Amino acid sequence: MTQSLFYKQHQRRINLWCWAFLAPTLVLYILFQGWPIIASWYYAMLDWSGMSSHINFVGLKNFQEVAADRYFWNAYLNSFKFTAGVVPLQLVSALLIALILNNVRLKGRNIYRTVFFLPVVTVASIVGIIMIFIWGPNGPVNGVLQSLQILKTPLNWLGDINLAMGTVIVIFTWKNMGTNMIYWLAGLQSVPQELYEAARVDGANSFNTFRFVTLPLIMPIGIVIALLNVVGSLKVFDIIKTMTEGGPFFATDVVATYIYRYAFSSELGLPRLGYASAAGIFFGLTIIVIAVLQALITKGLKRRQADFE
Amino acid sequence: MNSSPVAKGKKHFGMMIVHILLIVAGFVWVYPFLWMLAASFKTSEEFFSKGLSLIPASFNLANFIRAWNAAKFSQCFANTLVITASVVAIVLIVSAMAGYVVGRYSFKGKNMVMGIFVASMFIPLGFTIIPIFEIIKMMGLLNTRLGIILAESGGSHIVFILLFAAFFKQIPNELEEAAWLDGCGFFRNFVQIMLPLSKPVIGSVIIMQFIWTWNSFFLPLVLSLSNSKLWTLAVGLYALKGEYVVDWTGIAAGGSIALVPIIIVFLFLQRYFVEGIAGAVKS
């Protein structure tokens, strides 16, 4: 009896401590994540500049206006175009490099890793500004292509309406490939060495080993990496803001730059926080749907794998 | 092992080709940085006449001095340092505490809280930036360093909680039980037994959060738009562009300055970084 009472008290004390330890996280979360998620729904129904106390409740009008705005759908589509370009490019290039750098007999592989990781740790706005010059009409990219006789006249890679999106995709991939390389390396290291030895004994060449041993085993991690890439590239802001500001003629305008323009920049007159919130919700919902779909697919795959075994 | 000299030679040759390919690819990869570094020593005339060359005619420091003083980079640098150090400290403490209880104890409501945390990891900043801006404004922290620090440490550390939780989970119970018997309370148990064990996780949290905050652009831009005294390096560099004539060599020098701390931190903590991510991917 006393024993269980003591135990109960002890348990309650532990519970208290647990919540006390969780409290700082909860406070920060509620302030800067939880509440904002809820509040943006409310903001989205306001006609509000954020500057004055003049606030009008307009219901779903903002949503209707967003849905009818050609430029919003342009930005929305661009976000997906950008993602569709970035994700495969990033996944494949990072996997190739990871496969090479995973070789234990390769000397200096830590140096190579650092080299390929370097763009990840650099400030995006610097990268943006440097890239404006490097890919500009008088920049090194044109210089090299011209001296190799591939190009006759220099191209304005970031300023040409047809080239800008592709260029932005290449630069973003360059900036973030290193993270993917580390993910893949971690995945590759989880493949048991015995399997490679068994494949070698069976006389498999390196392509077959990759195809039938490595690939199936890193597939589950690959799906997670792909999802992280999708979500990360749909969120893109820094690089685009600093390189093209969404231009030329909205060719690289994505949802984040679109929202920024309405909420924080003075280009369009008074900011429209309510309208920008509505645009944010449209987009946030899309990302959540993708995340949920991914969770379901991974679950399905895992189940299939379990059945298989 | 007992492969013939011919096969060995072939292998050696193959390795050499791999090295050559890696060196070429690596050079292309870091070219923008080499270019920036070279440009930060060049004069404006040299920059425009010989923009491609990677070796400057002379190592003049005028660009660095101009960036540091005239473009107020010293101030940006100090801001970035204060903001980054504070965010790293806050996130480290907060996520270690949460990760400890989540990893080692089961209590009512835990699964729900964690479920909500993980689910909202996917929500983009563009979705929540306006309410964050308003909350900071309501708290009277708009255009203050504290505002940026709080907002930066706000939603970003869920990954680290999971990292800490996974680590603490696999520490054997005996250690903690012994400490309990010795009269070590909940808090001291955490600080004196658990934290010192978790150095690898602490290392990877420091380096990841350092990189994120040092490079962070959206939040500092939005929260310090109207007060250039609070600009971080990322925002200050961005503001340099296009305000007057673009001062390319000045920007290059500023960019080189901004790179130094992050490379130092990265080189020191690199080992933990790969381990940390590897651990996170596996679990």
Image: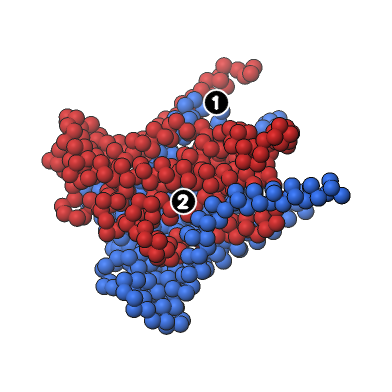
Chain colours: A blue, B red
Location of the N terminus of chain B by quadrant is top right
Rendering coords of residue B179 (x, y %): 69, 33
Asked if A147 appears above or below B61 in the picture, the reply is below
Indicate left or right for B221 with B92 as reference.
Answer: left
Point out the residue furthest to the front here.
Answer: A2
Disc 2 sits on a residue from what chain? B
Circle 2 Cα neighbour tier, 10 Å, few/some/many (<14 / 14–19 / ≥20): many
Q: Can the viewer see residue B27 in this picture?
A: yes
**Residue type of the residue flagged with mark 1:** Arg
Distance between mark 2 and mark 1 Cα atoms? 41 Å
Residue at point 62%, 41% (across, down):
B187
The label number, if any, that marks residue A105 in the structure image: 1
Residue in front for this viewpoint, B198 or A244: B198
Quarter assignment of residue B218: bottom left
Rendering coords of residue A208 (x, y %): 63, 40
Rendering coords of residue A233 (x, y %): 46, 56
Residue at point 29%, 65% (across, down):
A265
**Residue type of the residue flagged with mark 2:** Ser
The label number, if any, that marks residue B153 in the structure image: 2
Residue at point 44%, 73% (across, down):
A43
The label number, if any, that marks residue B39 in the structure image: none
Rendering coords of residue A226 (x, y %): 55, 53
Residue in front for this viewpoint, B114 or A239: B114
